[in-house]
Image (cartoon, coloured by chain):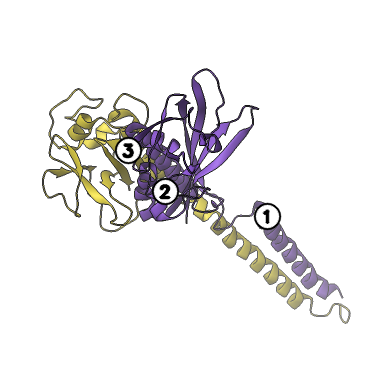
Chain colours: A purple, B yellow
Amino acid sequence: MRAQAHTLEAIAAGIVVLASVVFALQVTAVTPLSASTASQHIENQQQASAAGVLDAARENGALDTAVRYWDDTNGTLHGTSGGGYTTDTEVNRTTLGRMLLDTFEARGVAFNVYFTYTTDTGSIVRTRFIYRGEPSDNAATAATTVALYDDDPLYAADGAPTNTTVNESTSYDALIPRQSSSGLYNVVRVEVVVWRM
Amino acid sequence: MTGNRGQTTIDFAIGTSVFLITVAFVVAFVPGIFQPFADGPQEELAGVDRIADTLVYDLLDDGDSGAPLDRECTIAFFDGDSTDTGCAFDDGDSFASQVGLSAGHHANVTLVAGDSGGGPHPVCSDGTRITVSATDECTSGFALDAGEPVPPDGASVIGRRVVYVDGTTATVIVRMW
């Protein structure tokens, strides 16, 4: 009896050691998909790229055009039936969409663009401008703000300014409603979400 | 001494072996769990971001905040001569000292642009304007790249920034190894 006790004791000790390792693995959840400096690096690069596209779009006017690319007659964005642009052809309609496609498409990175604004009552509303799908858990976001003034013109489908201003428009409320009465129409936050497909 | 002790020595040997094998396995296994996190290219990951930000937001910046670059400074940075143009860097310095690269580190900076279908093409300059090449080579002028040529094999860390220069939206690719 004493003899077998040595063996059993050793096995019991081995089980305790193994159990500690298993426990340590379970509580820390270290897997190949865990966040590491490498995956963080990819997100940083995507975030920096998206911020760069927004800066470039502000510089060449694509941002203003995108926010006011509105079909006043039909009450939608030009060429959609509502809900934002989804296909490549639709996204290519605006310069902002084209810049994003040129930058991200070849790298296998998908993107959504949202407009966020504040309403009269102070609540924050987010509408879709370009919607290419549900972002993954590792998506990165870049945002910038655009001020809309009452006398800013809406843009026609070909990208030329029309004679209708945002304040005179009968349907622009549906995209971005008027929030301030002091000549400033509203402030729009343009948000780009990018993620690896 | 006889009868009730059985094979004490053999049982003890088996027990000790089982225990030692378990301990040896754990000692060999645990460091492997942390290897992907300890061994990564930590220096390059931090360095590549710093070089990209130094270039885009500091050396070549056009004075406003953000990604638009100064056309003349961008051309002066990549043209390979040493004529100082009053930009934020000393054109006579080597690439390594312009971006603050210490010895033993290697980096390359390249500007590319292109549409989603055609893939990236090099961005070229004739010394006055900046254009996107229609092919994989610059037919005239010089390509906007600086630093050491990228080695054909071995791993490198890549950083990207999107910039706007002379009417062109381009991607700055920084490689470090």
Q: Chain of mark 1?
A: A
Give the secondary structure at mark 3: strand
User: Are labels 2 and 1 on one chain?
Assistant: no
Q: Residue furthest bottom?
A: B3
Q: Chain of mark 2?
A: B
- Residue at image point 52% right, 49% down: A36
Helix, strand or loop status at disc 2: loop
Could you tell me how far apart the alpha carbons at marks 1 and 3 are, in whole angstroms?
46 Å
- Along the viewing direction, whichever of A61 and B33 lies nearer the viewer: A61
- Same subunit: marks 2 and 3: yes
- Mark 3 crowdedness (10 Å alpha carbons): few <14, some 14-19, many ≥20: many
Q: Is residue A164 above or below residue A19?
A: above
Identity of the residue drawn at 60% across and 55% down: A30
Kindly identify the amino acid type of the residue bearing the numbered disc 3. Answer: Val
**Relative to A42, A124 lies left or right:** right
For badge 1, the amino acid type reads Ala
Q: Is the residue at mark 1 from the same chain as the one at mark 3?
A: no
Q: Earlier in the sequence, mark 2 or mark 3?
A: 2
Q: Hey, which quadrant is residue B151 in on the image?
A: bottom left
| Nearest the eye: B41 or B133 | B133
Residue ID at (34%, 32%) = A59
Chain identity of mark 3: B
| In the foreground, A50 or B161 | A50
Callout in the foreground (2, 3)? 3
Residue at label 1?
A: A24
Residue reaching furthest to the top: A182
**Circle number at residue B41:** 2
